[in-house]
Image (tube, rainbow, N blue to C red):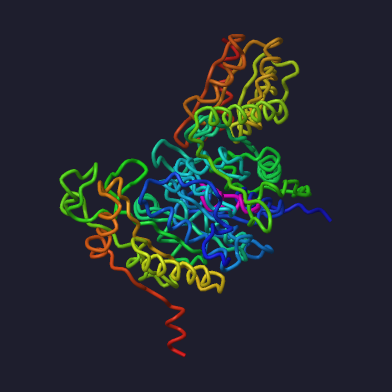
Amino acid sequence: MSDKILIAGNWAIGEAAIRAGCRFYAGYPITPQNELTEYMAENMRRAQGGTFIQAESEIAAVNMVLGASSAGARAMTSSSSPGISLKQEGISALAADELPAVIVNMMRGGPGLGNILPSQGDYFQATRGGGHGDYRTIVLAPASVQELADLTMDAFDLADKYRNPVMILGDGMTGQMMEPVEFGKPRPRRYNEKYILKGAGDGKSKFVRALILDALRMEEHNWKLVRKYRVIEQNEVRFETYKTGNARLIIIAYGIAARIAKGAINRLRDSGMKVGLIRPITLWPFPAQIIRDTAERIDRFLVFEMSTGQMIDDVKLALEGRGHVSFYGRPGGVVPTPAELAKAIVQEYRR
Amino acid sequence: MKKVFSRPRSLKSTPFHYCAGCGHSIIHRVICEVIDELGIRGITIGVPPAGCAVVAYNYFDVDMLEAPHGRGCAVATGIKRTLPDRVVFSYQGDGDLAAIGTAETFHAANRGENITVIFINNAVYGMTGGQMAPTTLLGQASTTSPPGRNAILDGHPIRMSEILSNLEGTAYIERVAVNSAQNILRAKKALKKAFQYQMDGAGFNMIEVLSQCPTNWKMNTVEACRWVDEVMSKTFPIGVIKDTVKGRKDAD
């Protein structure tokens, strides 16, 4: 019998996390991701050795995750845009301490409190580290509930593999829509015991810290992190291409915006217009090479984001001046229809 | 010859970086004596703060995870919930615990997290150079209250121990000092009781330590020790503030 069930995105993240061995979750209520916190409240307590804590703040939640991660738990916290701003202190600490953790951001309209509608305005924050200091988080951008489930499982493995925080960057729509999901088989955890603080026993004590007062040693720690980031950039880039083969114009979009773009592309293809899609699945590391390679054949790109234009910077960096890049964006919680996007694409296509 | 004094096993041989007359080094040593006497070095995990004790891991020979400023109780919560059979303590100063980390402290206490918090109250921000702390006394001069703390402009010194003792989740709270041999012995007894209570699963417990800071108080060591008795302990009286375990025994 198939394991396929109909499930909302936020629940799928929770279920996938528990199946992947997540045993510590701390969160704070914020729309549009409350279903995930509630799912964990219900199900984490039932999982053997599982801890659910409704924290007093986003800051407390991420710092609880810091403690749980150092003590060896697969740990996760989740929030939406304003709450993720508060978590940045802890994400920076996790990166500095080289501790694994999964942070879920179901983005909503901003800046400030903004609104509770789906948006993609946190791209810069997510892909540039977000908090203070020189660091990066791996950022995964799911475009379906199935992918939310798959990438949540992968996120824990990536966090362990690189001892680095991993962010799942979704939005209010992917979190709340229901789709059929088949949960994958989680891989056994591979995480070296030597990184876990559990008491020194009879041996030598260990400590984990981010404060390095000596400038040269702090610099060395920074370069060490950068060497790790280079490995991640080489090994972990993920993207999807859709109907790019004979395309004359390429849309670049991620997450729910890419779903909308596919709808638009299908309409345009029906009318004979050769339009394709590159969908970054990892936003950091960014799939720059495929964009650069595509520019050898196709010189017109349209970046579509539910923001005023953030990923477009990475597209331009990838292209290094090649091709022509245009932009269509709907920030603030507006979700355009495929028909609306198709119109914008046609204008660009006929230019 | 009988050995009457030696470095505790749980205390590394690294010389302390603390100023002459500072209370931190005394408190570190006493905690390590307690850890040794309870035989818990191998199962203890400490959480040092941002502040003067930020490099406590250079001294404590137990596993340690540095907390971001103020988050000691949240970090300790994450560790303790993951490893409930370990002994977990958070070591925090007054700015850390009673200003930037008030929420984390208050709610960990309210949840009754089974951890031990060692709260170093020296009435100033020591590491950053003597700014006004939430515990700075009325009239006490600091670099950010140069004419002396003024209640109307700067608010009042916060008595965290008394405040937390009103929460259902707290099991044991005592305020001690380390300005005399007698007080150090009392402090050690309190710390030992706190760790023992944690091992017995009693819930949140906190030892507030009035700790002299001669450098930022601009006093010599003798004056600073005297100031704890004559001035500081008038606002922050020494003694047991709450002990539910003892209370329960008394009820029997």
View extreme (front): residue: B1
Say which quadrant the C terminus of chain A sits in: top right
Q: Percent position (x, y) of residue B180?
A: 34, 63
Left or right: where does residue A334 sit relative to residue A248? left
**What residue is drawn where x is 66% and y is 63%?**
A49
Residue found 74% across the figure and 15% down from its top: A246
Position of B19 relative to A321 (above/below): below
Q: Which residues are magenta?
A: A62-79
At 49% from the left and 64% from the top, the residue drawn is B116
Q: Is residue A149 left or right of residue B58?
A: right
Q: Residue furthest right?
A: A1
Residue B66: x %, y % from top left: 52, 47
Displayed quadrant of residue B241: bottom left
Is residue A30 toward the left or the right of residue B152 in the image? right
Judged left or right of residue A234, residue A60 is: left
What residue do we see at 43% from left, 88% from top? B251
Query: Which image quarter: residue A297?
Result: top right
Q: Is the residue B51 above or below the residue A333 in the image?
A: below
Q: Determine whether A300 is above or below A332 in the image.
A: above
Give x and y (percent) for residue B181: 37, 65
The foreground one among A306 and A63 is: A63
